[in-house]
Image (tube, rainbow, N blue to C red):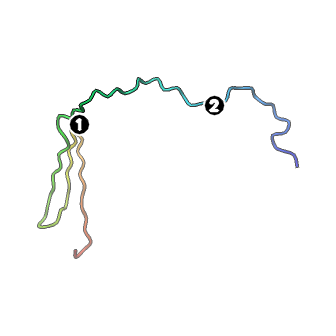
Amino acid sequence: MKSFLQGRKAIESKGLRAPHDHRVPLQVTGVVKPAPTGPNVEVVKQGDKVVRLVIKCSCGELIEIECLYAPGS
């Protein structure tokens, strides 16, 4: 049985290599300053159960998470 590559023209090219990273290396200056404001988390309850979490990121994005419980729990 002959190989399916038999008789095909070979292409001369350079081998693959990883791309060069042109970024400047990160330099640590000592103290890391926190963001001006962190995320704000609001808990919405009905009685003793948490029904929703409202998270507001310092960038302004708002994420709401609804908490669902099994019936009778």
Depth check: 40 or 36 in front? 36
59 vs 28: above or below: below
Which residue occupies the foreground of this view, 33 or 60?
33
Marks 2 and 1, the one that precedes in the sequence: 2
* Residue 71 in the figure: left or right of residue 42: right
What kind of element bears circle 2? loop
Q: Please state which amino acid type lies under the numbered disc 1.
A: Cys
Furthest-right residue in view?
Answer: 1
From the image, which quarter does the C terminus lie in? bottom left
Label annotation for residue 26: none
Q: Residues within 10 Å of mark 2 (few under 14, many from 20)?
A: few
Residue 54 x %, y %: 19, 51
**CB-based contact (under 8 Å), mark 2 and mark 1:** no
- At horizontal 87% and vertical 46% (from top left) the residue drawn is 2
Query: Which quadrant of the view contains residue 31?
Result: top left
Q: In this view of the protein, which residue sits in the foreground, 58 or 28?
A: 28
Local crowd size for mark 1, using a 10 Å CA cut-off: few (<14), some (14–19), many (≥20):
few
Which residue is found at the position 81% from the left and 40% from the top? 5
Q: Is residue 27 left or right of residue 58?
A: right
State the image quarter where residue 13 is shown.
Answer: top right
Compared to 64, does 8 lie above or below?
Answer: above
Q: Residue 22 appears at what percent x and percent y?
A: 46, 23
Residue 12 x/y as whole percent = 74, 26
Question: Farthest residue in the bottom direction?
Answer: 72
**Secondary structure state at the residue bearing disc 1:** loop
Q: Residue at x 20, y 55 (%)?
A: 53
The residue most toward the left is 47
Amino acid type indicated by mark 2: Leu
Badge 1 is on which residue?
Answer: 59
Q: Which residue is mark 2?
A: 16
